[in-house]
Each structure stands twice: as structure tokens, then as C-alpha cells.
Amino acid sequence: MRGIERWKLLIAVLSLLALVAVACGDDAGTGAGGGGDTGDTASQEHEVEQFPADTTMGKIQEKGEIVVGTKFDVPLFGFKNPQTGDVEGFDPDMAQIIADHLGVELKIEEAISDNRIPFLQEGTVDLVLSTMTITTDRDAEIDFSRPYYIAHGRILTAQDSGIEGAEDTAGKKVCTALDSTYQTVVLPEQMPDADPKIVDSYSECFALLQKGQVDAMVTDDVILAGFLQQDESLHIVGEELTTDPYGAGVQNKDTEFAEFVSGVIEGTFEDGTWQGLYDKWIGKYTGQEAEDPSTLSLEDALKIYPCSETC
């Protein structure tokens, strides 16, 4: 991976992160960012429109706060800084932009793969920005914004594991997160002879991999890239397994709120804010160009993962 040496700037924080996240008992953080230049990209002033009281946007404005679910254990996209207690990354910064457009405070709740949809259905959160891939099955339970990021599935394993791709995972213990697309689609379809290990969070997978209790972990490349820098005995292998467009999740049939969030996201494409977030959290460490999510519509994203379970 190009630019790998630049990832070492994050080692001090990331090496503590896995231990903090595995504990699973963290209190929810409030506010996003905490990084040195977060305000440059995520807290810009915006003209605030006042929405009707009977809309989700109006209700959020009335209470003065938007509650957003994100992950606390995914370096670069959503991680709780053990030194400051702030939740930092691409997703919290995007959440702050949405909060700014509503003129409200941002409150962050931890949302792992398994509870993201229940949190929306129960009203625990107003919005989910939690590395959530848009799929048709999920779209039957909640609504999505337009795609705001495109990731790809890869494998992280020890350099001496003998695993160089999905075809080498037969009989191997492969870890991923509960209710992720890797559990429901990738493992059964692309690694049918692997021995799956399903846990609550990717930081748990990473800890098991470091201890030698699993042979590999599989998830999105940008998630694996953050964990990779904590252990130089590991490497990312194989071809891209998936294309994973991330979307913001809202309650089912709340089309108006989904359209509002999509409009904010589209605005970040147009004014350069999105590129600033990418450069800040991903590009300056990987040295890789972003795959442009503005070219992919929600309808295009849904075609990538057609209905297989709930619809």
C-alpha cells in the first residue's frame, strides 16, 4: 500500500484503540472531532433553514440536538480517542456537517454493525453514519441517503498464514462482524469452506487475529488499513472482494429526512468539503486517490447488493 509509512503517525493513538473498543462498556461520547484541524472541514458555518415542526428536521431543531450512531473502533472512520474521549473520524465529521446545517448540537452514540438498524427503529438515534453498506435487504428495514463513500472488501492476515486470497481460506478461521455484509454475503458466497468466527466488532476480530486465534479477518479495505498499522506482521491480501457504498441510515419511510441528508452530502461534493475530509482522514495516510462516490446513485448502490433475505 502506497504511503504506508505515513500511517505510523497514528500508531500512538491506534495502539490503544483496540483495547478501549473491545471493552464494549464505553459511555457514548458527545461531539465529534477533537483532531487538530477538525474545525476546518466539519464545523464550517452554514445558512440554517428552519424546517416545519412536523418534519424530522423540525423535530431535531426543536430539541436542539441530533443523535448520530457511529462506530468507536474503526480507525479513520469512527474511533474514540482514548486520550481525549472525543469520537473522531470521517463519519463523525460528516455528522457534524449535518448538525451544522440544522443548527443543532451533535451527540454521538456508539453503533456497531449489529445494532445500527435497531437503534434507528427504536429511535435511539436520529441518524446512522457507521460505515454501513447500502443493501436492498437493509433498505427494506430503513431508508438510506445517497452514497457518501465507496469501500472494497479485502482480507487481513499474518504474512506467514499461507492465505493470499479468498480461495485459500478453506478450513481457515476467518473473522468478521455480526450482521455485516461479510457475514451474510461474502463468507457464504466467496469463502464457503472457511470456518467463520463472528463477533460484535472489528476490534475484537483484530485482537483475535493478533493472538493467533483466527487466521484472517475480512471487511472493508479502509477499516483494515487502520488496523494494519498496529502490527507489521500482518498484511492485506487478495483481490477486491466487494464494492461497498456507504450510506447514512434514517428511519424507514422517512424520505424527506433521507433527501435532506443526501442534499447535505451532495453539497460536500460540490464545495470541496468531502475531498477535504478524505484528505484529512484517509488520503494523507494511504497516498491513494479517492473513488468518487458522487458518480454512484442510491439506485446504483442498491443493485450491487440485491435482495436476499428480508424483502
Image (tube, grey):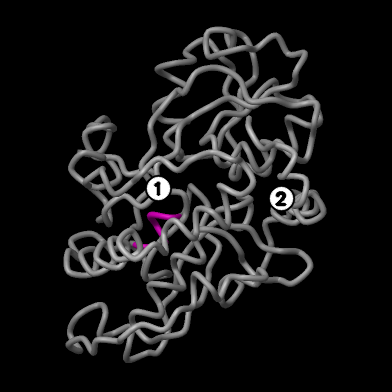
Depth order, front residue of 253/107? 107
Where residue 68 sits in the image (x, y, percent)? 45, 68
Q: Main secondary structure of the magenta part?
A: helix
**Quick check: is 16 in the magenta stretch?**
no
Determine crowd level at label 1: few under 14, some 14-19, many 20+ residues with C-alpha closer than 10 A. many
Decide: is 178 above or below 92: above
Query: Where, quadrant-wise, is the N terminus in this rendering?
Result: top right
Which residue lies under the disc numbered 2?
22
Give the quadrant of residue 58: bottom left
Query: Where, quadrant-wise, is the C terminus in this rendering?
Result: top left
Q: What kind of residue is marked 2?
A: Val
Residue at (38%, 43%) from the top-left corner?
133
Label 2 or label 1, whichever comes before in sequence order: 2
271 relative position to 230: left or right = left
85 relative position to 220: left or right = right
Which residue lies under the disc numbered 1?
149
Determine crowd level at label 2: few under 14, some 14-19, many 20+ residues with C-alpha closer than 10 A. some
Decide: is 282 above or below 271: above
Cα separation between marks 2 and 1: 26 Å
Of the residues tagged 2 and 1, which is closer to the observer? 1
- What segment is highlighted magenta in the picture? 116-120
